[in-house]
Amino acid sequence: NSEDGQAEDYLFKIVLIGDSAVGKSNLLARFARDEFYPNSKSTIGVEFQTQKLNIDGKEIKAQIWDTAGQERFRAVTSAYYRGAVGALLVYDISRRQTFDSVGRWLNELHTYSDMNVITVLVGNKSDLKDAREVSAAEGKTLAEAQGLFFMETSALDSSNVAAAFRTMVKEIYGVLK
Ligand code: GDP
Ligand code: MG
């Protein structure tokens, strides 16, 4: 901003979407606070959390929105999506049903937000190797077909969590700068 002579500030609204219990709130808790809740209920979600990232020497604020569990009732509202420039669309690799819902989430995202919203498809719970129902190849194929970025993550063991958020913010910055 002009007061301290720095270049302009960036604030990106990013929304977390995907079926209930896929790990959205825990991905945010891991990324923003390095915390994990083994038995979390839908109530742990905050409305949004702002996280600073440094990309190419620029300070970028990612304002990451989490649902308060309303996705259980398919009642995520247009206000949630309004102004979003990025979306993390999460499914659970150990529950195929949550992967089957990805198309419905994409429709909703495109109904309520800009068509150009940068979207990362995230297969979460990669630590649950023995319970896997969706292969990484399937996730990647769907992402490519839909023009999405793709990553598997684990909020439990932290793998790829920061990378998923950073990829998102970097791509948004790349488009806007
Ligand atoms: P949300 O409804 O999508 O926000 O899902 P939550 O973040 O509340 O997580 C639902 C459940 O899955 C909780 O019991 C979490 O502890 C668990 N969970 C979330 N992420 C992971 C993960 O990466 N691995 C494993 N094993 N469990 C997870
Ligand atoms: Mg939640």
Image: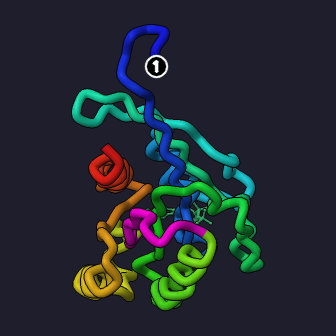
Could you tell me residue 91's position as x and y percent? 47, 75
Where does the C terminus fall, quadrant-wise? top left
Q: Position of residue 117 (x, y in %)?
A: 45, 64
Whether residue 83 appears in magenta in the rendering, the answer is no
- Which residue is depicted at the point 63% across and 45% down? 48
User: Can you tell which quarter of the image residue 168 is in?
Assistant: bottom left
Range shown magenta = 113-123
Q: Is residue 169 left or right of residue 97?
A: left
Within 8 Å of ligand 2, the CB of disc 1? no
Q: From what the image shows, is residue 53 above or below residue 91?
A: above
Name which residue type carries label 1.
Answer: Asn
Residue 125 visible, this orientation: no
Q: Is residue 108 left or right of residue 74?
A: left
Count of marks placed on residues: 1
Residue at x-position 38% and y-position 88%: 133
Foreground: 132 or 13? 13
Q: Position of residue 58 (x, y in %)?
A: 31, 29
For the point 37% across and 34% down, the residue is 53
Ligand 2's quadrant is bottom right
Establish if 86 lies above or below 28: below
Nearer to me, 123 or 113: 113
Give the SS element for disc 1. Answer: loop
Most extreme residue toward the top, as rendered?
A: 4
Asked whether the viewer can see residue 105, the reply is yes
The residue carrying mark 1 is 1
Q: Is 120 in the magenta?
A: yes
The residue sitting at 72% across, 76% down in the picture is 72
Q: Is residue 142 above or below residue 60?
A: below
